[in-house]
């Protein structure tokens, strides 16, 4: 933080200069942290979901997730999310209709004062034709996930980062960065100034 005219630190000062990360082939990929699980036979992996997870556990998670989605109480949402294994930090805000992964919610970490916006989805699994994949999702401290955004398995959203509404996050987001689009990519300073 920078000192104000009176010599005190201005805790509300926001820098307008931002160095944006460059996305390259070396940028950490969610695939570096996603585990693949082969499925037997010719049926797709979703047809075998009961071998991957207990149907009773998924049914309980589904009911709890439904309550989380419709409850207006942030305190109740945090309490319910913790009951199904989500690691929820202090002061987390979870928007209406926002959905945690119903199969593997215990792979989600939402750090202190982060916001998961209206109708956002945090996925920790993906069922494919010959395998299913699982991976942790981490939403860093004071990060913001916009309305309708989808975060895929294995993705880490850095502290203070922002994900624009309706974005599809397929790669890690650097701390303090703003990403948008399908797939989500860092926004440049000019685009940020227009919004």
Image (tube, grey):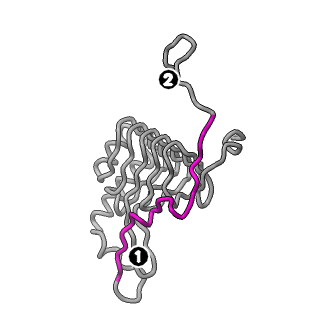
Few, some or many C-alpha atoms within 10 Å of disc 2 (few <14, some 14-19, many ≥20)?
few
Q: Position of residue 100 (x, y in %)?
A: 41, 54
Query: In the picture, residue 135 is in which quadrant?
Result: bottom left
Q: Secondary structure at mark 1?
A: helix
Residue drawn at (30%, 47%) of the image = 82
Q: Quick check: is 184 in the magenta stretch?
A: no
The circle drawn on residue 46 is 1
Q: What residue occupies the far bottom of the structure in this picture?
A: 42
Q: CA distance from mark 2 to mark 1?
A: 49 Å
Magenta-colored span:
17-39
Q: Nearer the viewer, residue 90 or 65?
A: 90
Q: Position of residue 13 (x, y in %)?
A: 56, 25
Residue drawn at (44%, 41%) of the image = 114
> Quick check: 131 above or below 58?
below
Q: Position of residue 67 (x, y in %)?
A: 39, 49
Q: Nearer the viewer, residue 37 or 40?
A: 37
On the image, numbered disc 2 is attached to which residue?
Answer: 11
């Amino acid at each position: 933080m920078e000192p104000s005219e009176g010599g005190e630190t201005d805790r509300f000062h926001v820098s307008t200069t931002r160095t944006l990360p460059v996305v390259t082939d070396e940028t950490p990929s969610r695939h570096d942290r996603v585990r693949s699980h082969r499925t037997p036979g010719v049926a797709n992996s979703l047809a075998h979901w009961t071998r991957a997870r207990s149907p009773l556990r998924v049914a309980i998670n589904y009911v709890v997730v439904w309550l989380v989605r419709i409850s207006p109480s942030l305190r109740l949402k945090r309490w319910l999310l913790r009951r199904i294994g989500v690691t929820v930090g202090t002061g987390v805000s979870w928007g209406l209709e926002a959905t945690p992964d119903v199969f593997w919610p215990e792979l989600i970490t939402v750090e202190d004062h982060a916001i998961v916006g209206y109708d956002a989805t945090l996925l920790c699994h993906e069922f494919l034709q010959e395998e299913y994949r699982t991976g942790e999702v981490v939403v860093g401290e004071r990060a913001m996930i916009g309305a309708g955004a989808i975060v895929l398995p294995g993705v880490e959203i850095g502290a203070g980062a922002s994900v624009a509404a309706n974005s599809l996050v397929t790669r890690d987001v650097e701390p303090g960065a703003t990403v948008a689009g399908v797939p989500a990519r860092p926004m440049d300073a000019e685009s940020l100034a227009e919004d």
